[in-house]
Amino acid sequence: MSWEGDGKIFRVKYRQDDGQVVTAIVERIGWAEPPAEEMKRIMAALRAGPKTIVGRPGKLAKKI
């Protein structure tokens, strides 16, 4: 087994009893459940959303 990118990508290679060689390359792209410290940081950013919106109401919504 080998690791790249601080554990972001890993490769596993093994030989089965019948002689076949199996190789798997796996890339980690996210968490099923993030670490507690990371979740605190994300939630703080979401709570600190915009306080004021400038412009005519509905102008942007009509274009989308």
Image (spheres, grey):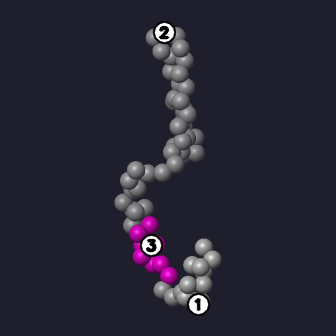
For mark 1, give the secondary structure. Answer: loop
Residue denoted by label 2: 18
Residue located at (40% from left, 63% from top): 39
Residue located at (52% from left, 48% from top): 29
The kind of residue tagged 2 is: Asp
What separation in Å lies between label 1 and label 3 (alpha carbons)? 24 Å
Residue located at (53% from left, 14% from top): 20
Q: Is residue 64 left or right of residue 46?
A: right
Instruction: In this rendered view, identify the residue nearer to me: 59 or 9.
Output: 59
Q: Earlier in the sequence, mark 3 or mark 2?
A: 2
Q: Is residue 33 left or right of residue 58?
A: left
For mark 3, give the secondary structure. Answer: helix
Q: Quadrant of the C terminus?
A: bottom right
Vertical placement of residue 1 versus 32, above or below = above
What separation in Å lies between label 1 and label 2 (alpha carbons)? 70 Å
Q: Position of residue 33 (x, y in %)?
A: 38, 53
| Magenta highlight range | 42-50
For mark 2, give the secondary structure. Answer: loop
Q: Which mark is residue 30?
A: none
Residue denoted by label 3: 46
Q: Position of residue 54 (x, y in %)?
A: 57, 89
